[in-house]
Amino acid sequence: MSTRLPQISGFSTAKIVQSLASNPGSFPVQSLYIHIPFCFHKCHYCDFYSLVDTRDRQVPFVARLLSELAALAPLSRGAPLRTIFIGGGTPTLLAPPLWAELLDGLSQHFDLSHIKAGRGEFTVECNPETASPELFALLQQGGVDRLSMGAQSFNPKHLKTLERWHDPASVPRAVGLARDAGFTRLSLDLIFAIPGQTLTDWEQDLTTTLDLGITHISCYALTYEPNTAMTARLKRGQFQACDEDLEVEMYELMVDRCTDAGLTRYEVSNFAVPGQECAHNLAYWQQEPWLAAGPSASAHLLDPAGGSWRWKNLPRLDDYLKKSDAGHPPARDLEAPDPRRLLAEQIMTGLRLREGLDLPALCAGVIDTTLKEQLAAVAHTQIARHHLAEREGHLQLTESGFLFADGLAGEFLALLS
């Protein structure tokens, strides 16, 4: 069930948080996402909520964020957080004194003992142009142990196509500063299938990235999301989308180069040195619960009776900064617990993972026999097409299956809609 709430309805997450926090059947939530919306430029392909703030609202934003974190803290029940991910926007645009406030507030409201002892993970997204020794030292002292840097490409022509404003030379510089500050866990984001990009261009981006000794790489094919400048330019005929056959070649080259460099594909678009996988993203993909704070941030809490609660904070900074119920900002798109929807989400994300999914175990006690048989039939069809393989009781994508992961998931989800 999904309840579409008015854009400004007075709804907040306070009642849900109060109910789940007082329910002994609810277990502690050990992952937290924080969204910082500020950017110095809006990239044309990006559909995440971000803004170029001309009104200098960083100070009230951090104050508001800290009040929301205090309101969410009861759902951790004092248990140590296992993962934190701060994304955006460009989180590293926050002024260092505000970072100090935020990191101190996190320590006050949540148990960070696992993270500070090296048994958890604390990631911050970083734009290479904003890297500085002062900022990296501050993040290190606050418990951050992993940086995710947006490179996208090392080719100035392709960065211009994406309207990505950074100098390619700033990426190795930022990597060097991060290592000087003591960071050993570094991830780099790349985009392929950019209009005008050749296979040779893409290989050069991969080579440059791998030569930096990065332990985690996220490589995404360019997608044309609704309501982005990139999609509008495509519709106006300003460029042509990448040829599908070339996109496949780029993906296969990416797999080969990363594998040869010792990075294992653990999700369709993510590669890591063993042990360096992003634990926070795995929490998403494995449908674990997580808390979320900041405008546009989405939360996912499991319900003791089955299914999960989901909601999204309103994606408008002005609304977020207003005072609201018990420290919780206005939200929208509340989805009440629905075991069938949770199953669909588990299939959609689990199928993309290297481990695949145990379909019978996921279906047990959730759906009727007929639907289970229909899902099993889809699985057998895809096994016959060599897109899926059954290994140790799990359905896993084959090499060809990785190229059609979304379409395969769609065939299962069509039965659950």
Image: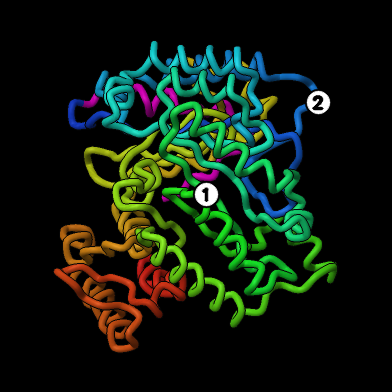
Estimate the x, y position of residue 60 in percent, counting from the top left: 65, 14
Q: Residue lying at the far bottom in this picture: please name it.
A: 384
Q: Given contact means CB atoms under 8 Å apart, are the residues at marks 2 and 1 in contact?
A: no
Residue 108, quarter of picture: top left
Few, some or many residues within 10 Å of mark 2 (<14, 14–19, 20+)? few
Disc 1, SS: loop
The dot on residue 212 is 1
Answer yes or no: is residue 19 visible: no
Give the amino acid type for the residue marked by disc 1 in the picture: Leu
Quick check: 306 left or right of 96? left
Residue 32, quarter of picture: top left
Quick check: 324 left or right of 42? left
Q: Nearer the viewer, residue 325 or 388?
A: 388
Q: Nearer the viewer, residue 277 or 13?
A: 277
Residue 158 forms part of the magenta stretch: no
Give the amino acid type for the residue marked by disc 2 in the picture: Thr
In magenta, the rendered stretch is: 1-23
Estimate the x, y position of residue 98 in percent, counting from the top left: 59, 15
Residue visible at 62% across and 64% down in the picture = 204
User: Residue at label 2?
Assistant: 54
Answer yes or no: is residue 210 visible: yes
The dot on residue 119 is none
Residue 369, quarter of picture: bottom left
Q: In the rendered structure, which disc, 2 or 1, sits on the residue that comes first in sequence?
A: 2
Distance CA(mark 2)–CA(mark 1): 35 Å
Residue visible at 37% across and 36% down in the picture = 290
